[in-house]
Amino acid sequence: MTGLDRRPAAATDATLPRGPLAGFAAGSLGMGVWVTVPGLLLLYFLTDVLAVDPWLAGIALLLPKVADVVLHPWVGHRADVEQTRRGDRRRLLLVGCALPLAFAALFAVPGGLTGAPAAAWVAVFFVVGNLLFAAYQVPYLATPADLRIGYDERTRLMAFRMVVLTLGILVSGLLAPLLTGGDTATRSGYQRMGLVLAVGMLVAMLVGVAGISRLRGSAADPTAVGHGGWRALRTALRDRQFRWLVAAYLAMSTTTHLVLAGVPYYAEYELRATGLTTVLVAAFVAPALLVTPAWLMVARRVGKQRALLGAQGAFALGSLVLAVGRPAGLPVLIGAVAVLGVAFAGMQLLPFSMLPDVIRAAPATTGAGTYTGVWTATEATGAALGPYAYALCLTVGGFVASTAGESPVQPDAALAAVRYGFGLLPAVAMLAAVLLQRRYTLDATARTTS
């Protein structure tokens, strides 16, 4: 480390205007669709519509995300090159706006494909979509580190993003199952859903590009020059604070995506009502619209680190309630999901506002794109590991795959796997996140110095 903030202290006191803040946050509306819908429906789409065995479906979702481990840091390097040469990262953002095309194609599996060929189709377009998502997400998340703002203002910036991201997650999470046909979902329903949501994604992402330009125009830090390459990547990976923050976030990302992947199964096989998928998604996501300002206040009062540990602990406790299943009663289970939603809001806001703290404390030779490239690769890995872990639970339980319209009888072990995979496994994974997060020690210094 070269000190907490490698830029002059006087350059970190800007207050961002609300208009550009709202424009920046709008980009997360489109990103929220990509973050949510594949995680929520893709595993179910493969196993219960395309007749793909759970183990193969898990691999089809995991392998594209493994590619992200390489792709995202490379995109981060390109983002830093763009910052150095052009003074911004706008071109990469515009390339990323092609993401809606890949999203639509992901669910437009040709009618004759089932089983392994269908899994291959999904895997290919998942790789393409993840690369385009990285092209948008990496420069997008590098923005807070490029601005003349301090510790609390970074949290405020990410709070705006979190509210809009939550709106995107909520709207897409509620609309997607309805657009597919709900209880009678079909291939054509999934295709319709992909097209409708892709249009909304494109509009939101373009507004986000304009918002970033306005923010940079009002508070850009001229000393925030990006330096990428393998040397910068090694520097980032050797950053102890960054490593612990990333490791904890990997556990959090894996856990939340595991829960999202398990929602349709838990609703259908544990609660015995497919229509409750929408209710559970709403209970998980909607609280964030209300509690994000509260998390902002808590972070200002006790610091981001302590607030995040509280969110992680609440998530683990709520998950244990879900492991009880039907005997706990539907109101209690929906309440437990709401607790997960409150914790989820904190786990989205706080780590993302801690990331620019780490970047600003890093050696000046390392660009923000390099750090965010590794960060988004970690997030993508968690997005793959979560559904894959749930798919493994189903496989161990002997879950029977089917095509749309079929209702095979599931063995008792498969039903137990649905329940424990949705409740007990997330609690264990979140406990690991708590242990990792406690090793991060930058927050106290960042709070008092920045």
Image: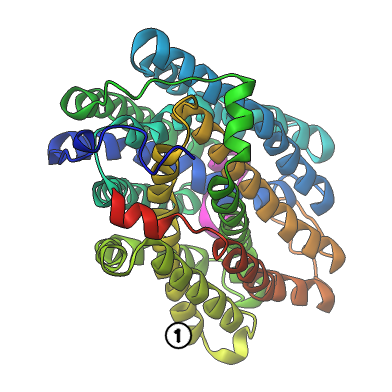
Q: Residue under circle 1?
A: 331
- Residue 64 pos. (x, y %): 70, 34
* Res 360 → quadrant: top left
Q: Which secondary structure type mostly characterizes the magenta part of the structure? A: helix
Q: Is residue 73 visible?
A: yes
For residue 38, what is the image quadrant? Answer: top right
Residue at the extreme front of the image, as rendered: 2
The structure residue drawn at horizontal position 42% and vertical position 41%, both measured from the top left corner, is 361
Residue 108 shown in magenta: no
The magenta segment is 180-190
Q: Residue at x 63, y 73 (%)?
A: 427
Residue at image coords 35%, 41%: 29
Q: Is residue 321 left or right of residue 165?
A: right
Residue furthest toward the top?
A: 85
Badge 1 element: helix
Q: Residue at x 62, y 83 (%)?
A: 325
Vertical placement of residue 199 versus 37, above or below: above
Tell me which amino acid carries mark 1.
Answer: Pro
Q: Give the x, y percent position of residue 232.
A: 57, 25
